[in-house]
Amino acid sequence: MLSVQGLGLHHAGNYLFRDVNFTIKRDDKIGLVGKNGAGKSTLLKILSGEINFYEGNVVPEGNITIGFLKQDLEFVKGRTVWEETKQAFEQINSWKNELDDVNDQLATRTDYESDYYHNLIHRMTDLNDLLHHHDAYNLEGDMEKVLLGLGFKADDFDRLTDEFSGGWRMRIELAKLLLQNNDLMLLDEPTNHLDMESIIWLENFLKDYNGAIVLVSHDKQFMTSVCNRTFDVNNKKIDDYKANYTKYLELRKERREKLEQAKKNQDAEIKQMEDNINRFRASATKASFAQSLIKKLEKIERIEMDNEDVSKFNIRFVQSVVPGKVIFEAEKLGKAYGEKQIFDDVDFFVERGDRIALLGQNGQGKTTLAKILTGQIKDYSGTWNLGHNVNIGYFAQNQEEVLTPGKTVLQEAEDAATEETRPRVRDLLGNFLFSGEDVQKKTQVLSGGERNRLALCKLLLRPFNVLIMDEPTNHLDIQSKEIIKLALNKFEGTLIVISHDREFLQGLADKIFEFRDGKMREFLGNIDEYLEYRQKESIREISAEKSKLDNRKAQAEVKVEELIQTEPEIQTTSSETRQNQDPSNTFITKEQKQLQNKLKKAEEKIDGYEKEIQSLEEIFGKTNPTDAELAKYDQLKKELEETLQLWEDLALQLED
């Protein structure tokens, strides 16, 4: 589908890539891994054609279509969610408009034998084939499926996109890309701004996607589930593993062990050569031999390896004094911004040693609660109490709100340190990849990942007994996330964490506070148990939203029918009818009769499947479904989809 030959790219005077070669096939789903700054996003921009100043060649096969989800967003005001999503079908809409024009001409022209009329008929056939190939007459059903899967409600479809946050607008852009069915889809951090349930839905969508995918993600579980191939971007090259992320880790470990041994042997050889050069250089008889050794040493291509063993990083969140048994206690807590109620009537109880994950869609109040508990928001309804001897360390989602502009990285860290931890400041900054001149950078010029690393470093420099972490893994690469998770698991105090990363939360939290529809529910259990429970619930919720949309359509159809019935009826005489009627239409062949019978049977099957599905959905709305009921539901949905496709094929044959 696409081949890359001898790719090289200079960046800031150095090579970012050098002599990179690979081929992407139609069934490839490739995950790009590597440290931040290794060039993953840059590679996507090269493949998309956004960057074209490079060495080597990027050669697409034929007229393949490429779709690219970038991290930056281009936003047009004044459209509804539905209207904006429809922009995904710009080409299809163009074909539909052209077909309407062709049909209008065929209906009004009378030069039936002319070349122009025959060309119109051929064009009509071509357009119908194109529209059928792209499933153009089921676009609205696909739009509903994707928007609901990404977390939108039916009531959101008619709302202006201006009303939504940047994260929700990014979901619309993602929906548009998913609906385009490109041959190659490039995704840069597609799970950013998604809640956990939307991530799982996207994961399943991409696994079934009929095309090639190249994606960047720091979500290990997402990568393992979606990808069948992994590119490790490191040291100006790409190591290609024909495996998903979990298998890649095993294969890379084996490769690194061999590489470490090769590096050890090379280092010994280089040291021996350097010793000989120093010994022979002073000797007049051996000087020429020393020069030949120097030339040989210069030609050696040295093996470079990154330090990736996170267990070597001795990082700990230090606990302060032991607090009282009760950390937080809230009763009928609520928060509104103007007329918009975020949540209300929330009761909860946090005890010493609790490890709680706050989950829910963006905008449901997770960050708001964190800011209330840390004293940053003081206008709220209800009451909450802080326990005895509680010292809170807070990691904010937006670090620009808490870092001091004008200060350097070193100054910011030293200000956070105690007398005991001040001597460790530079070592700790080094662990978070701030060394040399990096510690003199001003905080306002730091990237998102650098700001997060600095904020985490500050939390490690002062003792706390409660940590409230709002999306601590944002902008962090996989290795940095592992380091933080290791440190949080060692923390002996109370932990409240907001995250959409399933793998990060596994083994970290044993209680869930779920925010949904203005309320908060407590779930006793780990993240895997919670997600299993939510999977069953979400089937009912999506079915309810789909029913709401179906009801709207039915009401609209009734209104249209009423309008048609009130229109004055235009009569034609029987002679006119006979003159205008095509004689071939008065005769039904045996084949057409058979098609009609098959069509009728398909319609009966469709009615039966829809009734059974509706019956199950009603059961799901009252009780939690069993595994057998869920399996039957999935099978019915599959059979319904296959029968609908059969009905469509039969209808097209009958038209022909």
Image (cartoon, grey):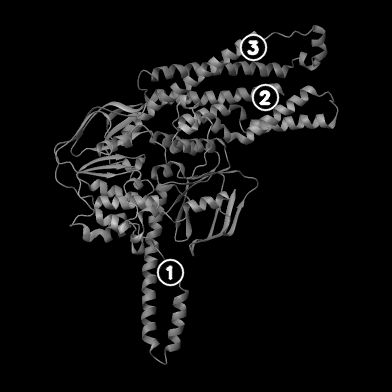
Image: 444 above or below 85 = below
- Badge 2 vs badge 1, beta-carbon distance below 8 Å: no
Element assignment for label 3: helix
Name which residue lies at 64% across and 9% down. 565
Q: Amino acid at mark 1?
A: Arg
> Residue 266: image x %, image y %?
39, 71
Q: Is residue 501 left or right of residue 593?
A: left
Q: Which label was assigned to residue 237? A: none
Work out whether mark 2 precedes mark 3 in sequence or the reverse, and give the earlier one.
3
Local packing at callout 3 (Cα closer than 10 Å; few below 14, some 14-19, many 20+) is few
Q: CA distance from mark 2 to mark 3?
A: 27 Å
Q: Amino acid at mark 2?
A: Leu
The residue indicated by pointer 2 is: 652
Image: 233 above or below 367 = below
- Residue 245 or 141: which is nearer the viewer? 141
> Residue 185: image x %, image y %?
54, 43
Work out whether mark 1 precedes mark 3 in sequence or the reverse, and give the earlier one.
1
Q: Which label was assigned to residue 564? A: 3
Q: Amino acid at mark 3?
A: Ile
> Residue 304: image x %, image y %?
41, 65
Name which residue lies at 34% across and 61% down. 440
